[in-house]
Amino acid sequence: MDRFKKAVELSFRIRPAGIALAAVYALSCLASRQFSLDQFFLPAGIRAAALLIVPTRLWPYLLLGEYAYFATLRIPMIDTYGLDWVILASTLLMPMAMLVVHLHRRKMPSEAATGLWLLSLSICTALFVPALNLSISYLLWSNPPPSNLLDAVDRTIFGHFAAIITLVPLAFLWSRRHADPGWANRFVAPTTLAILVMLILGLCMQLTSASAHTTRTHMVLLAALPAIALTFMHGWRGAAIAIPLLTLPLHGATPSTGLPSSFDLGTFATQQNMAVMSVALLALGSSISYHHQRAHARWQGERNALRLARSSHQSSERELRERAAHLKHLGEGMDSSLIEMVSWLKSQGHHAVANSLQHASSVHSRLFREQASLVYPTGLEQVGLYVTLQAGGACEIWSDTHRVTQPRLMGNPCLLSVDLQLASYRSLIEAVSLFLELENGQLCVRTRSGRAGGRRGIVAVVSLLDRGCTLSTRTTQQAVERLAGRVLAYGGAIHCKGNRLRLVLHESITHASPVAA
């Protein structure tokens, strides 16, 4: 029996924060009702916005606040409209709104579909909640309802929709404030200017006389321009900020009789246009956010691919560096053995053999070091790219072909990182080898390293000395196939035009790790 009691026992802990939330919600609805019109019913917008901002576990307190709000309003109406209407029309509206919001929250939108999701939520809430309220009223009112039913439906549904589409996007923006915290840092000055212009135009609406409907309409059209600018800059987020800045000043400037059911026909057409404009802004913002997300994903993918390619090249260079160090160690061992052999031959009186062996060993040792430097230019880490090109194995190979003129090297490459200098070295060696293989005539090599904006880099040009010649199609294709991987990994580019091949490699200054010259 005790186990059964524990199984069916329900516990509900009253939270002080929840009671405060209920009180704030009820007071907000009561206060906003005093400033509401039939064509702009603020409590409906507050209801939908609160359901978006408040976590689901605290929804019972919102329901409590809703009942307190209706109790204040409708208990005095029992004698006029009957107890049944007061109870049903007060208790069913918030559950209907909760059901609509819950069904939408089950499938939270992606960044690209947020605007359309907000439109769906606003339209459904503005249709089902007022429809339920009107149905109960027309079924249970003891007094005859107004004669023009369609007019009452039009005003009520539009008034709910105008308020909901004003507050719901802003509430959803607040609930998703951590999804993309960096969006507010984009276009700070233009965004501030657009908001300031809309605030000034909203103030002008308040200062306009109540009968100047045409003037207010013109101001609304002018305010639509910075609203469109905000949408273009920030997508659906810009629309969520712009819509309240458009609609709330117009609502505040709308003439009112002071009664909760006040209606102004002169502003109604402008508010209808404003509702259409709000829908268009959210749809446009959703499309812009979608394409921005796709572009950002594509940019991120390209960035990751380049980062992985660069990491792969750096890993290969580390392996080649270890191999070159091993070759250097072997070369030093062979040189040491040959020196000992030469010394022994001289001590035995074989001076001619010793001198011949010493000469042959020095030649082969030099050739061995040149080939080892082509595997990995270890001197580049100490003396930089230009000295390595002028004194390494590549320079000897170019000189032996008698086709490469003295390179013209300008700038200080030691300000670049070792990785970028290595990539430049490999690309330049490969480009010259390609020209020597596929082209005829003399070659000219020119480089310039320096800084442009926030980046450091190097430009290398390999060209035919004869300016009347043009690179063959095969050379151009091979250059792109054999050089693009390394060059693009460092954010560079390859340009083949006329008689020359131009390579550009660069890096961010913050990522550079210069070597000392």
Image: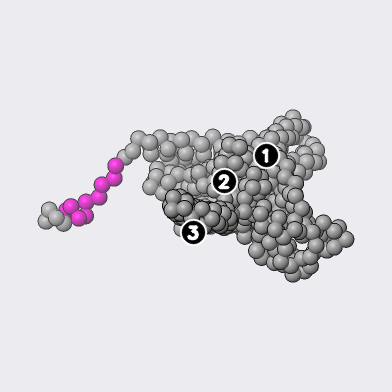
The residue that mark 2 highlights is 379
Q: Nearer the viewer, mark 3 or mark 2?
A: 2
Amino acid identity at mark 3: Lys
First reached walking from the N terminus: tag 2 or tag 1: 2
Viewer-closest of 271 and 447? 447
In the structure shown, which secondary structural element does the residue marked by tag 2 occupy?
loop
Spot occupied by residue 432 in the image (x, y as percentages of width and height): 70, 58
Spot occupied by residue 281 in the image (x, y as percentages of width and height): 68, 50
Spot occupied by residue 236 in the image (x, y as percentages of width and height): 62, 49
Spot occupied by residue 274 in the image (x, y as percentages of width and height): 70, 47
303 in the magenta segment: no
Locate the N terminus and report the quarter of the image it occupies: bottom left
Instruction: Residue 434: name its quadrant.
Output: bottom right
Q: From mark 3 to mark 2, how far is it between C-alphas?
A: 60 Å
Count of numbered labels shown in the rendering: 3
Residue 372 visible to an observer of this rendering: no
First reached walking from the N terminus: tag 1 or tag 3: 3
Residue 32 visible to an observer of this rendering: yes
Viewer-closest of 470 and 253? 470
Viewer-closest of 121 and 338? 338
The residue that mark 3 highlights is 107
Would you call the spot at circle 2 few (<14 residues within 10 Å), some (14-19), or many (20 or more)?
some
First reached walking from the N terminus: tag 3 or tag 2: 3
Q: Which region is colored magenta?
A: 5-13
Q: Tell me if residue 409 comes above or below residue 483 in the rendering.
A: above
The residue that mark 1 highlights is 412
In the picture as drawn, the residue positioned furthest to the top comes out as 207
Q: Are marks 3 and 2 in contact (CB under 8 Å)?
A: no
